[in-house]
Image (spheres, rainbow, N blue to C red):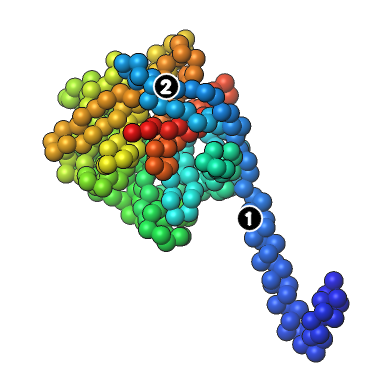
Amino acid sequence: MFYYLEKLLNVKAMKSQVMPALLVSLCIVTFMFSQESAAESIARIKYPTISIKDDVGDELIHVQAVAELSNITINGSKASELSDLAWDNDEQILYALSDNGHLLSFKAVFNDNKFVELLMVNGISLHDGKNKKLRWKNSDSEGLALINSSNNIQGDTQFVVSFERLARVIQYNQQGFIEKQLEIPEKLKNNSNYRSKNKSLESILFHDQLGLIIGTEYSLKGKDKAQLGFYTLDGKFWSFPAYFHDGALTGLSSANDNDLLALERVYGGFFSGFKVALHHLRITEDHIETKVIALFLPEEGFFNDNFEGIERHKDDYYFMISDDNNHFIKRTLLIYFKYPR
């Protein structure tokens, strides 16, 4: 091959200089091709005609696509037990956090605004302060938010993760190593304040008006369990009433006009399954106005899954993810829906 390249370029006299450069170029092209090829299609996508009703029977949510994910593994990170989502607008990447200390990146492919394919691009492990991969009780990662994900600069995104069991909020770089531990209200640092060590820092979000907000799965001990909500860094608890008895807050997303969407979930047991309520939250000066905009009920036959994460994609479109608990009879569903305002 190189003989014909020499003839074409007429560089026999410079063979010692040109041929290594050509080899390097070929290696770079091969590497780029292998990197692109590493992205693997991970989902079977269906397009059901489903409109979800709110608590008074009005149809508000229009499901555009339902993707069932395969439990494939990339770089030691498995697409399973996914607990939260975050959309990187600069990179056009959908990040998913697993509740065992792994961060996965997906490429959502659209054709004429139709969600047609989901590619698994990469997976990284989160690390502790000694640069060791998180394990056991240290690895119960639940909430995910992004820094520098919409500043028109590629390559500078960082990840903010909230944890249960050992309640804390950590900022990570793109390799999964700690940049810093974020200060949170004192009451959230003490595990004994939670109703269970596994019922603590469930969700996290950057809000234009309130700054960093941290959602607890249930209200802290001593507060009304029928009230769900989140804390701001000044220690204030912003609450709204749960729709279900024993309902838990599992996800938060930004919405239009600095509003929020909140996921509430309750598990009624093996035979009853999961019930999910989707709340629209409006922040006023000192309280939250709430409306239940969708109910996902097992008896309706749509989704009987453990939904834990929700994220705005663009405009009126959102992703929502379920946690399969790494159980072979359960599934990971990624719902793409429109909530028109």
Residue at horizontal 74%, vertical 81%? 18
Residue at horizontal 73%, vertical 84%? 17
Residue 171 visible within the image: yes
Residue 153 quadrant = bottom left
- Dividing the image into 4 quarters, which one contains the C terminus? top left
Q: Secondary structure at mark 2?
A: strand
47 or 39, which is in the foreground? 47
| Residue 8, placed above or below residue 127 | below
| Left or right position of 158 against 243 | right
Residue found at the far bottom of this picture = 13
Instruction: Report the amino acid beneath label 1.
Output: Gln
Residue 225 visible within the image: no
Residue 178 location (% of width, % of height): 39, 54
Q: Secondary structure at mark 1?
A: helix
Q: How far, Cα to Cα, is label 2 from label 1?
A: 39 Å
Disc 2 marks which residue? Answer: 52
Mark 1 neighbour density, 10 Å: few (under 14) some (14–19) many (20 or more)? few
CB atoms of marks 2 and 1 within 8 Å: no
Residue at horizontal 48%, vertical 54%? 91
Disc 1 marks which residue? Answer: 35
Residue 316 location (% of width, % of height): 39, 38
Mark 2 neighbour density, 10 Å: few (under 14) some (14–19) many (20 or more)? many
